[in-house]
Amino acid sequence: MALSLNQLQKQVQRLVMTPQMQQSIKLLQMNAIELEQLTEQQIRDNPFLELREEEDSSTQDPSQIKNQASDPFPSPDNNAEPEKRNINPEVEEARHKDLEKEPEAFDKVDTDWEDLYSDSENKVYYQKESYEQEDFTEYTAKGTSLYEHLMRQVELSVLEGRDKQIGEYIIGSLDENGYLQSSLEDIAENLQAPLEQVEDALDVIQSFDPPGIGARNLAECLRLQLEEQNVRDYRIYLLIDEHLKELQQKKFKEISKAMNISQEWIIQAFHRISRLEPKPGRRYTKEQPQYINPDVVVKKVDGKYLYFLNEGRSSNLRINSYYRQLLKNNSHLSKEDKAFALEKFRGAIWFLKNIEKRKLTILRITEAIMNAQQEFLERGIKHLKPLTLREVAEEVEMHESTVARVTSGKYVETPRGIFELKYFFSSGLQTETGDNASSTSVKEILSQIIDDEPPGKPYSDQKISKILEKRGIKIARRTVAKYRDQLKILPAKLRKTIQNPSV
């Protein structure tokens, strides 16, 4: 068949993402803090948006900005003297009262909210109170990093000149836990220094606080801490150097036989070693605590659960009446200024619409989740029910992707604590009664069983499986092991508590 170029015309249907739809999806994915930041940016960029609590800015004479083409909509000068504005306050107040009664539509700008929320419910939700004053206790001081802590000690140490340079290089080669990641040979080669000089500098660094810093492995870290405590018994150092792995697995009989030392002494040494810090640098982590600002608050009032949305400053947004009047009386505006004004006005209207849509969507989905988890609200985590995105999507008549966007990265404050909305979705496990139990509630029960087990004789995974079966939950041993790993709980042989003979 010969190749040829032809022009064809065909009709297809496809979804086109308008800027308004893209903004709506973007707002749904934001949490309360991100929405607060976006709102502040919109206020700075769009002169038609203002906060309701701010002083009314519609007292400037439009004739004052007639010739300001470079900045057709500057911020009103509230600091100017009244006599310079040449405005009659009584006339201005009457004019604004009349303006509030007029429709918010200019040219072809559509501001009919019902067009966007034709399927919205006429339901009353209560808004959470906003606190404008911030408490200084909400702030924490910036912590000192491990590098900064050690560099201060270098300045006070005996290291000088070339030795100080080597010491600083060693400190820069430590990881976040305080372990030396580079070999001494590589450091000596990189700095063109004798190996003995590098070893001497390392000895000085290892004498710094915290004890165990600068170690090259766990055994050396533990030995450095014991030396700092002036422990003189050579046997404990031999135990660490030759039997650390067996000691971690609590194989006391094997160690006792290999070292020809009593098992009681091995157990006593084990308890002493277990009190040492295996990661001496982690107390100086650079990570700052991340405080959760819940997006929704659920409270029980008079036997009924109410839902409060944390809207922040976005709840006080409105259209600036001064600029709205300026756009209406556009005889003073050039063609370019009017086009600029209409673009900003449309953007302000759509931003307010999408914020309202976000509010209704989050509240409807949260209410559907909480209605499905009434037992959790009343009785706690053990009574969580299996729940899927599809079930909530069908309840609120939305797409699953919308529910996923709303529940990801957003938190709800309940009488039982603060949880991510995704926390309430989990698979189900069959029970003897025929009902399904949430995997989350099963993990909570499993954790409670392990907390209550005898310290000297912990339950095996098979034993836990049988205990759960007696409670009506059929679960295999391998599933118990999987849940235990997810909860970061050690196996039975490592959970065994050995009593210290010296106590």
Image (cartoon, rainbow, N blue to C red):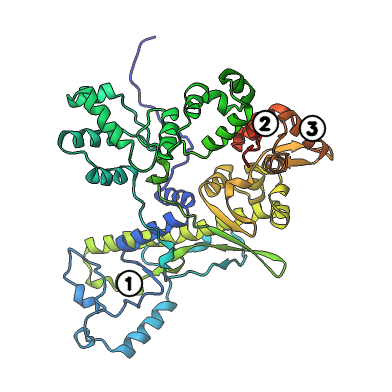
Residue 118 place in picture, x, y as percent: 57, 58
Give the residue at mark 2.
Answer: 492
Residue 408 place in picture, x, y as percent: 53, 46
Q: Residues within 10 Å of mark 1 (few under 14, many from 20)?
A: few
Give the residue at mark 3.
Answer: 466
Residue 194 place in picture, x, y as percent: 19, 23
**Label 3: element kind:** helix
Q: Is residue 322 above or below residue 272?
A: below
**Mark 2 and mark 1: span between their CA atoms?**
76 Å
Q: Nearer the viewer, residue 132 or 369?
A: 132
**Label 2: element kind:** helix
Give the residue at mark 1.
Answer: 328
Ranked by sequence position, the earlier of labels 3 and 1 is 1
- Marks counted in the figure total 3
Depth-wise, is mark 3 or mark 1 nearer the camera? 3
**Label 1: element kind:** helix
In this picture, residue 305 sits left or right of residue 405: right
Q: Residue at x 28, y 89 (%)?
A: 88
Q: Is residue 467 above or below residue 239?
A: below
